[in-house]
């Protein structure tokens, strides 16, 4: 039984439209976020902020992949390709965050206090979980692995925002430049895990319980 038959044609149309809206919002938000983060990072010589800006670009790539998929008459035909793009985005994000964290821990880079960065991270920490939740619910109901995978990437962005916020605050208040690097390494580990799931197409089967604590309820389709 196809996803459309399980959900219903009318409901499927609503869910696809909702996903397209969320993706459009995510792309717009992350473009603005990337510009602000890269500019603020350059001014403050903050590798963490520059990395956050690059993460926003990865978010745009992931969201664009889902937008491309759902622009088709039959989005399921583009599912596998979209998942591959999202997986590569996860791996790229993990690689950059890991290298950046190691360089910071080694003392090669020393981020300076950035009030703009703190404000940006705080806003993203509030906005991104909401966007992720909306897309994840629609994606799961529709049975779209790519939409669910993209929602995970958005949620990961929220965790990166949290790590960035803590790091910038500790650096600004206590001079602990290493704090965000430690958190970033944990986030990189999650990114690798989610990238592997997206590559395998397991995004709908494997929940983001590791990040959200969410318990899955299985439903039998008749």
Image (tube, rainbow, N blue to C red):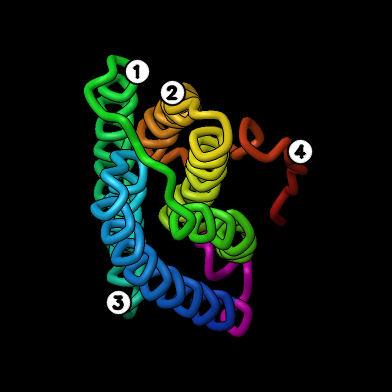
Q: Residue at x 33, y 80 (%)?
A: 73
Disc assigned to residue 140: none
Q: Which residues are magenta?
A: 1-11
Q: Nearer the viewer, mark 3 or mark 1?
A: 1
> To which residue does mark 3 refer?
72
In whole angstroms, how far apart are the C-alphas of marks 1 and 4?
Answer: 36 Å
Q: Main secondary structure of the magenta part?
A: helix
Q: Residue at x 31, y 49 (%)?
A: 44
Q: Are marks 4 and 2 in contact (CB under 8 Å)?
A: no
> To which residue does mark 2 refer?
178
Q: Is residue 39 magenta?
A: no
Q: Is residue 5 visible?
A: yes
In whole angstroms, how far apart are the C-alphas of marks 3 and 4?
Answer: 32 Å
Disc assigned to residue 215: 4
Q: Sequence-wise, which precedes: disc 3 or disc 4?
A: 3
Q: Sequence-wise, which precedes: disc 3 or disc 1?
A: 3
Q: Nearer the viewer, mark 3 or mark 4?
A: 4
Quadrant of image for the C terminus: bottom right
In whole angstroms, how far apart are the C-alphas of marks 3 and 1?
Answer: 45 Å
Does dot 2 land on a helix, a strand or a loop?
loop
> To which residue does mark 1 refer?
105
Q: Is residue 10 magenta?
A: yes
Label 2 crowd (10 A; few <14 / some 14-19 / many >=20): many
In whole angstroms, how far apart are the C-alphas of marks 2 and 1?
Answer: 6 Å
């Amino acid at each position: 039984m196809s996803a459309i038959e399980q959900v219903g044609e009318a409901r499927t149309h609503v869910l696809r439209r909702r996903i397209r809206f969320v993706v459009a919002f995510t792309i717009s938000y992350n473009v603005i976020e990337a510009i602000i983060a890269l500019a603020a990072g350059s001014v403050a010589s903050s590798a963490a902020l520059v990395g956050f800006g690059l993460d926003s670009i990865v978010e745009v790539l992931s969201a664009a992949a889902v937008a491309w998929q759902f622009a088709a008459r039959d989005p399921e035909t583009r599912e596998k390709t979209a998942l591959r793009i999202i997986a590569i985005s996860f791996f790229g994000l993990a690689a950059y965050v890991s290298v950046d964290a190691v360089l910071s821990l080694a003392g090669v880079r020393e981020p300076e206090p950035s009030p703009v960065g703190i404000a940006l991270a705080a806003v993203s920490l509030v906005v991104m979980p909401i966007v992720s939740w909306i897309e994840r619910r629609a994606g799961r109901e529709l049975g779209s692995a790519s939409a669910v995978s993209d929602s995970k990437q958005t949620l990961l962005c929220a965790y990166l925002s949290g790590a960035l916020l803590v790091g910038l605050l500790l650096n600004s208040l206590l001079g602990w430049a290493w704090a965000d690097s430690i958190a970033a390494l944990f986030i990189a580990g999650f990114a690798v895990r989610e990238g592997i799931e997206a590559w395998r197409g397991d995004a709908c089967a494997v929940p983001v319980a590791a990040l959200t604590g969410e318990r899955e309820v299985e439903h039998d389709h008749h």
